[in-house]
Each structure stands twice: as C-alpha cells, then as structure tokens.
Image (cartoon, helix red, strand yellow):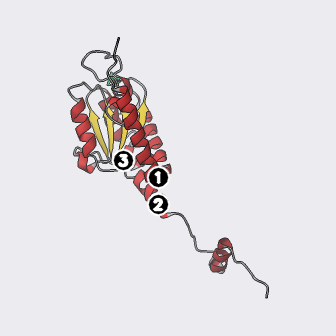
C-alpha cells in the first residue's frame, strides 16, 4: 500500500477548508508573552538633573510615551521593571541607585539618559560617578546633553526590540557578562 505523508501546512490547509473567512494566527507562546511584556514596561525614572525635564516632556501629551505602553511611572522599585537614569550621579548617590536597582521586579532593564548618566558628562570631578555602567548593567545608552524626547522614545523602542528577541537564558548570560565587565572597570588602578 502506498504510504502518504501529511505535512503540518497541508493539515492546516485541510482544517481551514471552507473556513476561508476566518482569520488565524499561529505562533510560539513565549514570543506572545515577550510581545506583551515589551508593551507593558513600567519605568522608574531616577531623575537628578536637567535630563529629568526631558523625561517629563516625553511622558506628556506632545510626545506621549503611552503610545509605547510605558506610561506608568512608578516611584516604588517593586512596581517597576525598567529604571531610567536621568542626570548626574554622585558617589554618595551610587549605593542608593544600586539598592533601588536590586529592588526592581525581575527581569529588569536599565536605560541611561544623557552624557552625565552615561559617562559623568562635563562633571569630571572627585564626587561624580563617571558613568552608571560602573554600578548597573546598562541596556541602552542615550547620548546628548540633554537628549531630546524623541531620543528617549527611540531608546525605548530599542529596548522593546531587544526584549522581544532575547530568551531568558540569553538575558541571564548578558547580565553575568556585564557584571564581570563592571568588576573589571572598578578595579583600582595600581601605579608601580
Ligand atoms: S546630560 Fe546635560 S542635560 Fe542631562 S543632566 Fe547632564 S548636564 Fe543636564
């Protein structure tokens, strides 16, 4: 007897016969969950200086961050999963920022806004942290002094894209790698 093999698309086509007016979408559950997560990021704005004003503008009607599902700023780290650091961070503030990061809900994300947060900016002094990537695993950096609200929205879109593509295992590996880089960056320089 001749053996007939039915492939998955044929099977689907058979099932759909006579139901051409119905619309079907198929996919992987984890992709669907990540898509949902990417449009429901809850930001914790850690604003210490002028870049904070840009975030206020991004959240207000003209730029409307709600279009990207991130309109719910939280001032409790336990009800947020994305910290947006805006402004100069001093060494005195650094332990507080790190503490807040640890309290965020997992999986958590970090956006560094502007020159000050990303590199210390013009404040190359004894009291200013020269970039928050010395204490936090940063996902997206936004250049500028200050960056415009469009740049903050673009960073958010990049964050969403990254979130949708990355598996939980890849995310864990990336954080581990960034923590190693941080430790290397924070080693004291020994001059012999
Ligand atoms: S990057 Fe510029 S605008 Fe932003 S906090 Fe620093 S000085 Fe202010």
Q: Are marks 2 and 3 in contact (CB under 8 Å)?
A: no
On whether ligand 1 comes within 8 Å of the CB at mark 2, the answer is no
* Residue 167: numbered disc: 1
The residue carrying pointer 2 sits among few (fewer than 14), some (14 to 19) or many (20 or more) residues within 10 Å by Cα, namely: few
Relative side of 53 to 5, left or right: left
Which residue corresponds to the image point at 30% horizontal and 31% vertical from the top-left? 52
Of pointers 3 and 1, the one earlier in the residue sequence: 3
The mark tally for this picture is 3
Alpha carbon separation for disc pair 2 and 3: 21 Å
Of pointers 2 and 3, the one earlier in the residue sequence: 2
Alpha carbon separation for disc pair 2 and 1: 9 Å
SS for dot 2: helix
Q: Are marks 2 and 1 in contact (CB under 8 Å)?
A: yes
Relative side of 41 to 99, left or right: right
Residue labelled with disc 3? 70
Quadrant for the N terminus in the image: bottom right
Which one is closest to the eye, mark 2 or mark 3? Answer: 2
């Amino acid at each position: 007897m001749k053996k007939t093999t039915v492939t998955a698309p044929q099977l689907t086509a058979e099932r759909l016969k006579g139901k051409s007016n119905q619309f079907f979408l198929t996919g992987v559950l984890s992709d669907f969950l990540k898509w949902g997560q990417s449009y429901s990021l809850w930001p914790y704005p850690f604003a210490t200086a002028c870049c904070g004003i840009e975030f206020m503008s991004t959240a207000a009607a003209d730029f409307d961050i709600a279009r990207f599902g991130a309109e719910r700023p939280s001032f409790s780290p336990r009800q947020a999963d994305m910290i947006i650091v805006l402004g100069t961070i001093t060494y005195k503030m650094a332990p507080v920022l790190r503490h807040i990061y640890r309290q965020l809900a997992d999986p958590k994300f970090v956006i560094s806004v502007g020159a000050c947060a990303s590199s210390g900016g013009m404040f190359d002094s004894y009291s200013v942290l020269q970039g928050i990537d010395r204490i936090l695993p940063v996902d997206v950096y936004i250049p500028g002094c200050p960056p415009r609200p469009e740049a903050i929205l673009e960073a958010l879109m990049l964050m969403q894209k990254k979130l949708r593509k990355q598996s939980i295992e890849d995310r864990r590996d990336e954080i581990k790698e960034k923590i190693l880089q941080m430790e290397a960056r924070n080693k004291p320089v020994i001059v012999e």
